[in-house]
Image (cartoon, helix red, strand yellow):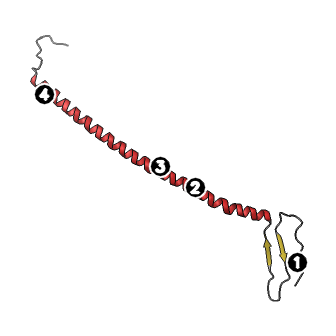
Amino acid sequence: MGLPVPASRYKDDVTITRTAPLAGSQGTHRKSLTLRARLYLLAIVVIVPTCIYIAHGILTDVASEFRTAEQLMTVLARITAVDTEQFLGDSRVTMTRISRRMVMAEPPVCTSRRRWI
Protein backbone atom coordinates (compact mmCIF):
# COMPACT_ATOMS: atom_id res chain seq x y z
CA MET A 1 0.00 0.00 0.00
CA GLY A 2 1.09 3.53 -0.74
CA LEU A 3 1.21 6.44 1.60
CA PRO A 4 -1.86 8.67 1.86
CA VAL A 5 -1.67 12.09 0.26
CA PRO A 6 -1.61 14.87 2.87
CA ALA A 7 -4.92 16.67 3.49
CA SER A 8 -5.46 20.20 2.25
CA ARG A 9 -4.47 23.09 4.46
CA TYR A 10 -7.80 24.84 3.89
CA LYS A 11 -10.79 23.75 5.94
CA ASP A 12 -13.38 24.41 3.16
CA ASP A 13 -11.77 22.12 0.63
CA VAL A 14 -12.84 18.54 0.10
CA THR A 15 -10.37 16.12 1.64
CA ILE A 16 -9.29 13.42 -0.76
CA THR A 17 -7.53 10.34 0.52
CA ARG A 18 -5.70 8.29 -2.10
CA THR A 19 -4.16 4.91 -1.70
CA ALA A 20 -1.87 3.09 -4.06
CA PRO A 21 -3.71 0.98 -6.59
CA LEU A 22 -3.89 -2.72 -5.92
CA ALA A 23 -2.70 -5.14 -8.50
CA GLY A 24 -5.21 -5.29 -11.37
CA SER A 25 -7.42 -2.43 -10.15
CA GLN A 26 -7.75 1.18 -11.14
CA GLY A 27 -7.29 2.44 -7.60
CA THR A 28 -9.79 3.80 -5.12
CA HIS A 29 -10.70 7.42 -4.58
CA ARG A 30 -12.66 8.40 -1.53
CA LYS A 31 -14.11 11.88 -1.00
CA SER A 32 -15.26 12.98 2.40
CA LEU A 33 -17.32 16.17 2.64
CA THR A 34 -16.28 19.03 4.85
CA LEU A 35 -18.44 20.21 7.71
CA ARG A 36 -19.68 23.22 5.71
CA ALA A 37 -20.68 21.01 2.77
CA ARG A 38 -22.49 18.63 5.12
CA LEU A 39 -24.38 21.55 6.71
CA TYR A 40 -25.38 22.85 3.28
CA LEU A 41 -26.59 19.39 2.34
CA LEU A 42 -28.55 19.11 5.60
CA ALA A 43 -30.13 22.52 4.99
CA ILE A 44 -31.19 21.49 1.49
CA VAL A 45 -32.59 18.20 2.76
CA VAL A 46 -34.67 20.08 5.37
CA ILE A 47 -35.66 23.18 3.38
CA VAL A 48 -36.83 21.54 0.14
CA PRO A 49 -39.47 19.26 1.74
CA THR A 50 -40.60 22.15 3.97
CA CYS A 51 -41.09 24.39 0.92
CA ILE A 52 -43.00 21.64 -0.85
CA TYR A 53 -45.22 21.16 2.22
CA ILE A 54 -45.94 24.91 2.44
CA ALA A 55 -46.68 25.15 -1.30
CA HIS A 56 -49.06 22.17 -1.02
CA GLY A 57 -50.88 23.87 1.86
CA ILE A 58 -51.22 27.11 -0.08
CA LEU A 59 -52.56 25.30 -3.16
CA THR A 60 -55.02 23.36 -1.02
CA ASP A 61 -56.30 26.61 0.53
CA VAL A 62 -56.66 28.28 -2.87
CA ALA A 63 -58.58 25.29 -4.24
CA SER A 64 -60.88 25.33 -1.19
CA GLU A 65 -61.53 29.06 -1.56
CA PHE A 66 -62.23 28.57 -5.27
CA ARG A 67 -64.82 25.87 -4.53
CA THR A 68 -66.42 28.07 -1.86
CA ALA A 69 -66.59 31.04 -4.25
CA GLU A 70 -68.09 28.82 -6.95
CA GLN A 71 -70.80 27.59 -4.59
CA LEU A 72 -71.53 31.15 -3.45
CA MET A 73 -71.87 32.35 -7.07
CA THR A 74 -74.26 29.48 -7.80
CA VAL A 75 -76.44 30.47 -4.82
CA LEU A 76 -76.40 34.13 -5.87
CA ALA A 77 -77.36 33.17 -9.44
CA ARG A 78 -80.31 31.14 -8.15
CA ILE A 79 -81.47 34.00 -5.91
CA THR A 80 -81.21 36.41 -8.84
CA ALA A 81 -83.19 34.04 -11.06
CA VAL A 82 -85.96 33.72 -8.46
CA ASP A 83 -86.12 37.51 -7.95
CA THR A 84 -86.21 38.11 -11.72
CA GLU A 85 -88.96 35.53 -12.16
CA GLN A 86 -91.01 37.15 -9.38
CA PHE A 87 -90.46 40.61 -10.88
CA LEU A 88 -91.56 39.44 -14.33
CA GLY A 89 -94.63 37.75 -12.85
CA ASP A 90 -95.57 40.96 -11.03
CA SER A 91 -95.01 42.95 -14.23
CA ARG A 92 -97.30 40.60 -16.18
CA VAL A 93 -100.04 40.99 -13.57
CA THR A 94 -99.66 44.78 -13.66
CA MET A 95 -99.71 44.88 -17.46
CA THR A 96 -102.80 42.65 -17.54
CA ARG A 97 -104.63 44.99 -15.14
CA ILE A 98 -103.63 48.04 -17.19
CA SER A 99 -104.70 46.42 -20.45
CA ARG A 100 -108.13 45.54 -19.00
CA ARG A 101 -108.67 49.14 -17.94
CA MET A 102 -107.70 50.40 -21.38
CA VAL A 103 -110.17 48.10 -23.11
CA MET A 104 -113.00 49.16 -20.81
CA ALA A 105 -112.36 52.88 -21.27
CA GLU A 106 -113.66 54.77 -24.29
CA PRO A 107 -110.96 55.66 -26.74
CA PRO A 108 -110.46 59.40 -27.07
CA VAL A 109 -112.19 61.04 -30.02
CA CYS A 110 -110.68 63.94 -31.89
CA THR A 111 -113.21 66.73 -32.36
CA SER A 112 -110.96 69.22 -34.03
CA ARG A 113 -111.10 69.59 -37.79
CA ARG A 114 -107.82 71.34 -38.13
CA ARG A 115 -105.05 69.63 -40.00
CA TRP A 116 -101.46 70.16 -39.16
CA ILE A 117 -99.13 70.73 -42.04
Position of residue 1 measured from the top left corner of the image (x, y, whole percent):
87, 85
Above or below, 107 against 69 in this view is above
Please give the residue where the numbered disc 1 appears in the rendered image.
Answer: 4
Q: CA distance from mark 2 to mark 4?
A: 67 Å
Of helix, strand and loop, which one carries label 3? helix
Numbered circle sitting on residue 106: none
Measuring from the top left, give residue 97's x and y in whole percent.
16, 28
Q: Position of residue 36 (x, y in %)?
A: 78, 62
Q: What residue is shown at x 64% (from left), y 60% (from top)?
A: 48
Q: Tag 4 or tag 2, which sits nearer the N-term?
A: 2
Disc 4 element? helix
Q: Which callout, 1 or 4, points to the residue nearer the camera?
A: 1
Q: Which mark is residue 55?
A: 2
**Amino acid residing under circle 4:** Arg
Marks 2,4: beta carbons within 8 A: no
Residue at x 69% of width, y 61% of height: 44
**Could you tell me which quadrant the C terminus lies in?**
top left
Residue at (17, 26) in percent of width and height: 98
In the displayed structure, 54 sits above or below 81; it is: below
State the mark number for residue 100.
4
- Mark toward the start of the polypeptide (4 vs 3): 3
State which tag comes first along the sequence, 1 or 2: 1
The amino acid sitting under disc 2 is Ala
Residue 42 position by quadrant = bottom right
Q: Residues within 10 Å of mark 3 (few under 14, many from 20)?
A: few
Give the side of residue 58 with respect to residue 86, left or right. Answer: right
Q: Are marks 1 and 3 in contact (CB under 8 Å)?
A: no
C-alpha span from label 4 to label 3? 52 Å
Which of pointers 3 and 2 lies earlier in the amino acid sequence? 2
Find disc 3 in the rendering and name its residue. 65
In space, the residues marked 3 and 2 are separated at their CA atoms by 15 Å
Q: CA distance from mark 1 to mark 3?
A: 63 Å
